[in-house]
Amino acid sequence: MIVSLQGTLVSATPLHAIIETGGLGYEVHIPVTTAEKLPAAGAQVKLHTHAVYREDAQTLYGFATIAERDFFRLLIENVTGIGPKSALTIMSKLSLPLLEGAIRSGDIATLAKCPGIGKKTAERLVVELKNKVGGVGLSGAIDAGTGGAESSGSTGDTRQRDAVAALMALGYKAADADQAIRRAALALGATATTEQLIKKALS
């Protein structure tokens, strides 16, 4: 099993990245939330990966953090009707902190807003994962981007969740608030406070 891939980022789109290492170029399927953290082409990058082997295809899925990779595995291994493509769609729409928070709190409405995820699938997400998501977010090392910078893990996740909640209280839709806070976090870094994230997102 290929669990990580480190090399030169050749190119990237919101859903794919080409990484070259050892003379080989690997196509990796990624969620938008990982694509946002990638450096410019030509830079070194490391993704935590999950490989899916089938008779007609071998597909590699990559994530900025171990926690995101492990959550992807939870989705495809524990939720009926969720395959790799659906899991990437879910993780592209909402960040891991918001996804975990929605699952723990039983927020069906937020989960159902992901493309291709209806109310029934959102309910299955909550039922199947509610007691399993607690430990997934503990490992928050972010290797995408400049490679190897450690985030503040669950503390940073809490700050982002609180900032998203604040924007939602101001009338933002959950997905829009989540995207705005993700951009703010990328701009300010892992040590940004909840207040700084909110101000940046509103500026």
Image: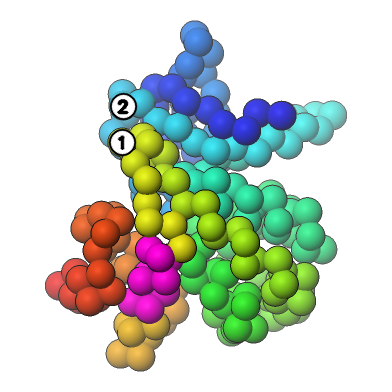
Q: Position of 175 compared to 66: left or right?
A: left
Please tell me whether the stretch drawn in magenta is mainly helix, strand or loop.
helix
Give the image location of residue 187, x and y in percent. Answer: 22, 56
Looking at marks 1 and 2 on the same chain, the residue that comes earlier in the sequence is marked by: 2
Please identify the quadrant where the N terminus is shown: top right
Disc 1 residue crowd, few under 14, some 14–19, many 20+, Cα 10 Å = some
- Amino acid type at circle 2 is Ala
Look at mark 2 in the image and give the residue it sits on. Answer: 43
- Answer whether residue 82 is visible to the viewer in this image: yes
- Answer whether residue 177 is visible to the viewer in this image: no
The circle on residue 84 is none
Q: Which is nearer the eye, 22 or 16? A: 22
Residue at screen point 69% across, 34% down: 51
Q: Position of 131 compared to 60: left or right?
A: right
- Amino acid type at circle 1 is Thr
Q: Position of 42 compared to 65: left or right?
A: left
In the displayed structure, would residue 160 be above or below residue 60?
Answer: below
Look at mark 1 in the image and give the residue it sits on. Answer: 146
Give the image location of residue 137, x and y in percent. Answer: 54, 59
**Which residue sits furthest top?**
23
Residue at screen point 31% across, 26% down: 43
Q: Which is nearer the eye, 56 or 167? A: 167
Disc 2 residue crowd, few under 14, some 14–19, many 20+, Cα 10 Å = some
Q: How many marks?
A: 2
In front: label 1 or label 2: 1
Write the start and end of the magenta stretch as one range: 155-164
Residue at screen point 46% across, 19% down: 20
Label 1 with label 2: CB-CB less than 8 Å: yes
